Image: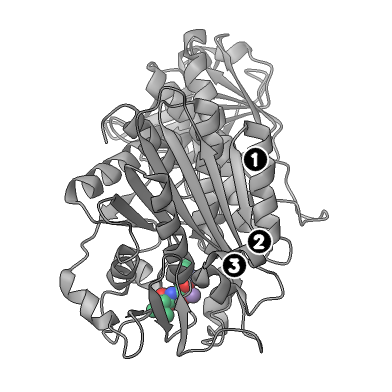
Amino acid sequence: MTSISLDSAALASLDTDALVIGVTPAGAGAAPAAGAEDLDRAMDGRLADALGALGATGKAGEITKLPTLGAVTAKIIVAAGLGEDPSAEDLRRAAGAAVRSLAGTARVAVALPAASAEAVGAVALGALLGAYSFDSFRTGGDRKDPVAEIRLAAAAEHEAAVDRARTLAASVKLVRDLVNTPPSHLTPEDLAAEAGRVAAETGLAIEVLDEKALVEGGYGGIAGVGQGSVNPPRLVRLAYTHAEASRTLALVGKGITFDSGGLSLKPTEAMDWMKSDMGGAAAVLGALDAIAKLGPKVNVVGYLAIAENMPSGTAQRPSDVLRIYGGKTVEVLNTDAEGRLVMADALVRAGEDSPDLIVDVATLTGAQLVALGTRTTGVMANDDDVREKVVAAAERAGEPSWGMPLPAELRKGLDSAVADIANISGERWGGMLVAGTFLKEFVPDGVKWAHLDIAGPSFNKGEAYGYTPKGGTGAAARTLVQIAEDLAAGIL
Ligand code: BES
Ligand code: MN
Ligand code: ZN
């Protein structure tokens, strides 16, 4: 993994391969941002001219590369556009895009304008996230090694901010790796084993229910979805406890290691990225990994509802009826609406921890993508204040999200002719809200709850941007950590 350290030495004198600086719009052209002064001196004050000649404008997202031609040890300068008055997220994205553009370069020094602890932390996190690559299944060829060593030009007093960035980056890397791992190599058992590894490393308590325990315990949703696969399902419970905590947060993640749709089979184009359907469970695991290291004063339990959704002679049929943990019955009219079935078991079970707040995360609906696009998480809740505070926490964590309603009239569409509820609606519209409405039925009475639909945000089918690579993005892990910290601080 990429290392990062603080370095207060002058930029021009650093023994490194590449220098990252900021560039902002200035008049008709662009100017190097704070942090690049001594480098500009070493280049005879010609940095702004050179950037201008290369067409740099300083707008956010822009990357301009220029050779140093021997003026300093580093061979190349990467100027990252910051736009006017950059936010923490602008800094994260600029650092990420710059470091990402340097894949194949061993040593990089980053000198973006970062005076406050918050800004240093943002640059550090963006740089680490931008250095990510997933190469476990490549055997050579065009493979480029990720940046190995990052030196951050900032005051030594900001070590704590860098350390927090290291922790968050490691947890996002874990989530991305799990999402990127092909389902041939990440079965429900494998995902539960990964949770076991994290628990052993961090001291989290763990309980794993196997397929036998799930059937005997009455977890009909997870057992029903998992029964069509030769790879049996699991329910994992992880727990972080703080001796002085007065509140408990329960996190619940959808962990479908592959979603073929089951007998309600998906078309080919919709299926090839369904290895990402465990992104919610991965985010919960990643968040608990970071929470265990950061130590906020709050108790956090995490549930990973894990199954593989496959068609077979043992698969559940459209029109089967399941009994969810706690006793409610569900008529399965479409086996591709499987996420809500596994989540229902875990939501009910989470009630046994007497949580002050439940937050669930799931790649739940294609309708999320229709409503909000590929990058913005849909946030629903049974309480307006909770929904707004969760959206605010996501914003501070640097993850785009938007509050969505759960209109009461949608419940009627889920009425079943034979069971307590059906898993799909007769009503075509508002699919993300319908799924949220279904989940709401399984939230324990009197417990505050928020639901994050990350169907789009968890997996980037397009080109890399900012600190976000192609493939698994790590979505929601940082938001969940922020929520735990907000609960600990009494903000939420
Ligand atoms: N895992 C999918 C949702 C999904 C779609 C995630 C695209 C990521 C990208 C989920 O299990 C699903 O199949 N949902 C159905 C529900 C429908 C049958 C009511 C959907 O959205 O089409
Ligand atoms: Mn599905
Ligand atoms: Zn699914």
Residue 153 on image: x %, y %:
52, 17
| Residue pictured at 29% horizontal, 87% vertical | 426
- Report the residue at 29% width, 73% height from top: 434
Amino acid at pointer 1:
Val
Q: Amino acid at mark 2?
A: Asp
Indicate which disc, 2 or 3, sits on the residue closer to the N terminus.
Answer: 2
Placement of 271 over or under 378, stated as above or below: below
Tag shown at residue 457: none
CA–CA distance between discs 1 and 3? 27 Å
Q: Is residue 204 visible?
A: yes
Residue, disc 2: 210
Q: Residue furthest right?
A: 139
Q: Quadrant of the N terminus?
A: top right
According to the picture, the residue beneath numbered tag 1 turns out to be 198
Q: Nearer the viewer, mark 1 or mark 3?
A: 3
| Disc 2: CA contacts within 10 A as few (<14), some (14-19) or many (>=20) | some
The CA span between labels 1 and 2 is: 18 Å
What SS does tag 2 mark? loop
Quarter of the figure with residue 122: top left
The mark found on residue 216 in the picture is 3
Res. 58 in view: no
Q: Is residue 112 above or below residue 228?
A: above
First-in-chain label (1 vs 3): 1
User: Residue 90, relative to residue 338: is it above or below?
Assistant: above
For numbered disc 1, what is the local secondary structure?
Answer: helix
Residue under the image location 33 percent in, 79 percent down: 421
Q: Is residue 234 left or right of residue 434?
A: right
Are discs 1 and 3 less than 8 Å apart at CB?
Answer: no
Going by the numbered disc 3, the residue's amino acid type is Glu
Label 3: few (<14), some (14–19) or many (≥20) C-alpha neighbours in 10 Å: few
Position in image of residue 261 (x %, y %): 53, 80
Q: Give the residue at x 28% y 35%.
A: 28
